[in-house]
């Protein structure tokens, strides 16, 4: 039977996992049809929950290549898990091609631009922005940082497994400016919140 291409493989891990892998054969051609569907403007509607519990239907927008690739990656991983199982849950693993992505990050700050931006920011956020600028850490990694991860004597910050994007631990050396930034932040913590287990930039 020809695989049915429906909008079930969208938006979330749960939807991807509900794709009818057993009822229908998932082939490379079926995946290509799904990709064409996700890039089209004719995908129906989805519920939108507004204020005061108002629910209305809005059109589903065409997905970008990055979004489609994330959905296909979940499908590929499901096949991989089925293939790795004992006994195997799938007989063959189809070729699932991914799309090209052209979302390379652009527009990095020169140091002078960073200094001008930092000066214009409120005082309470400047040290977190300084940490982000010199380490390249993501917002979630910075806000999750706690003092046991900071070694001022060794001049390093340790990002624990599970707190980074790829779930791998990282050790960040502290430059002079970063060291001074964290030392000042710790002085503020010790003065205003002594003994309270607050985050580094909270």
Image (cartoon, grey):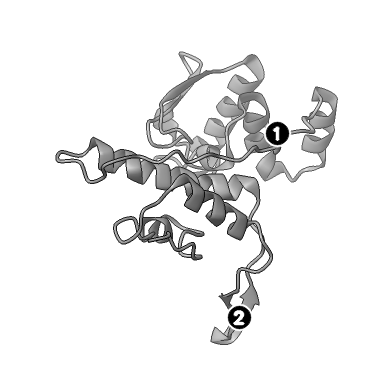
Looking at the image, residue 43 lies above or below residue 12: below
Looking at the image, residue 124 lies above or below residue 2: above
- Identify the residue at the far left of this view: 87
Relative to 38, 133 lies left or right: right
**Where does label 2 land, which residue?**
57
Q: Quadrant of the N terminus?
A: bottom left
**SS of the residue under disc 2:** strand
Mark 1 or mark 2, earlier in chain: 2
Q: Position of residue 114 (x, y in %)?
A: 79, 30
Q: Which of 154 and 143 is in front in this view?
A: 143
Q: Which of 192 and 94 is in front in this view?
A: 94
**Where does label 1 land, which residue?**
104
Is residue 197 shown to the viewer in this render?
A: no
Mark carried by residue 48: none
The residue depicted at 66 percent of the width and 20 percent of the height is 177
The residue depicted at 24 percent of the width and 36 percent of the height is 84
């Amino acid at each position: 039977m020809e695989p049915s291409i429906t909008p079930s493989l969208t938006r979330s891990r749960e939807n991807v996992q509900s794709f009818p892998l057993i009822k229908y054969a998932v082939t490379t051609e079926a995946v290509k049809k799904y990709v064409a569907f996700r890039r089209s403007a004719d995908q129906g509607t989805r519920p939108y929950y507004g204020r005061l519990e108002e629910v209305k239907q809005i059109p589903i927008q065409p997905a970008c290549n990055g979004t489609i690739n994330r959905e296909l990656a979940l499908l590929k991983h499901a096949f991989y898990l089925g293939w790795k199982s004992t006994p195997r849950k799938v007989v063959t693993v189809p070729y699932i091609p991914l799309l090209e992505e052209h979302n390379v990050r652009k527009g990095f700050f020169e140091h002078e631009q960073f200094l001008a931006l930092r000066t214009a920011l409120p005082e309470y956020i400047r040290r977190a922005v300084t940490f982000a600028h010199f380490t390249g850490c993501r917002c979630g990694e910075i806000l999750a940082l706690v003092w046991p991860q900071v070694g001022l004597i060794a001049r390093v910050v340790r990002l624990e497994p599970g707190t980074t994007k790829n779930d791998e631990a990282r050790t960040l050396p502290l430059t002079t400016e970063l060291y001074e930034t964290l030392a000042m932040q710790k002085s503020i913590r010790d003065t205003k919140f002594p003994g309270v287990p607050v985050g580094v930039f909270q």
